[in-house]
Image (spheres, rainbow, N blue to C red):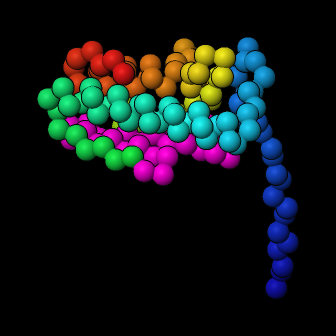
Amino acid sequence: MATVQAQPFPLISRNFSTDLPNDSDPITIDETTFVEACDSELNALHDSLLNVLDNVGEEYDIEFASGVITLSLNKIGTFVINRQVPNRQIWTSSPISGPRRYDYHPEDGSWLERRTSPRMTLQERLEEELSAALSQIITL
């Protein structure tokens, strides 16, 4: 009987934040600063979504707990926006564009998507997708 030896699995380490061409060095912030900035963004986003969606005439359900916003729009699907502390990012899952990652930029307080072109902020992406989905201009 022949024996098969397992080959070692090569471990490859990549820093996804620097994979883009023409990208500056990744911004590193400590966990406390990240959590404060992230919580501030998520709280403001949740409040804006509530205000906007109450006025658009679309049925929705929104939950916000433990750093995760879950927004269900009956005709469109579910958006999930959550903080990823180990990666220092906000991640989103959209029924329109799929998964996205946003890095914090302290110089202007924005959350910028660094892996796509054109690069968009979290707010710009949500405004664009919600506007298209609800057939009206949405401003958060």
**Apparent side of residue 8 relative to residue 133 in the rendered image (left or right):** right
List x then y, in percent, for residue 68: 46, 46
Residue at (81%, 46%) from the top-left corner?
Answer: 12
Q: Is residue 117 above or below residue 8?
A: above
Residue at (61%, 16%) from the top-left corner?
Answer: 108
SS assignment for the magenta stretch, majority: strand
List x then y, in percent, for residue 119: 56, 17
Residue at (65%, 37%) from the top-left corner?
Answer: 34
**Apparent side of residue 118 relative to residue 88 in the rendered image (left or right):** left
> Which quarter of the image is occupied by the N terminus?
bottom right
The residue closer to the viewer here, 61 or 131, is: 61
Q: How many marks?
A: 0
Q: Name the quadrant containing residue 94.
A: top left
Q: Is residue 114 above or below residue 60?
A: above
> Which quarter of the image is occupied by the C terminus?
top left
List x then y, in percent, for residue 109: 59, 21
* Region in magenta: 65-93
